[in-house]
Image: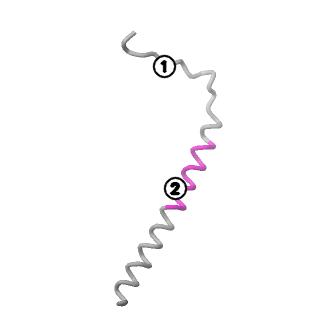
Amino acid sequence: MSTTLWIFLAVALVALAAFVSYMRRLFRESREAEKRIDHSKIRKWEDEDD
């Protein structure tokens, strides 16, 4: 394989690893935020047709 292809594959792999680690962190933070919500203060959703 040519050097250019190896460089492209390395950059793509680094970008994929960065994306996956960012998504894991975002998922973890959203799960923690969900735990902090006080569900007793949330009004029940009403349908607009009623």
Quarter occupied by residue 6: bottom left
Kindly state the secondary structure of the residue where label 1 is placed: loop
In which quadrant of the rendered image does the N terminus lie?
A: bottom left
The percent position of residue 14, horizontal first and vertical second, equals 47, 72
The percent position of residue 44, horizontal first and vertical second, equals 53, 18
Q: Which residue is mark 2?
A: 23
Q: Which segment did they paint magenta?
A: 20-32
Please check the rendered image and state whether residue 27 is part of the magenta-colored stretch, yes or no. Answer: yes
Quarter occupied by residue 40: top right
Check the image and name the residue furthest to the bottom. Answer: 2
Crowding at mark 1 (Cα within 10 Å: few <14, some 14-19, many 20+): few
Check the image and name the residue furthest to the top. Answer: 50
Q: Which residue is mark 1?
A: 45
Disc 1 marks a residue whose amino acid type is Trp
Overall secondary structure of the magenta section: helix
Quarter occupied by residue 31: top right
Residue 21 lies, with reference to residue 9, above or below; the image says above
The percent position of residue 26, horizontal first and vertical second, equals 54, 51
Q: How is the image coloured?
A: one colour
Q: Upstream in the sequence, badge 1 or badge 2? A: 2
Which is more toward the observer, 49 or 28? Answer: 49
Q: Which mark is residue 32?
A: none
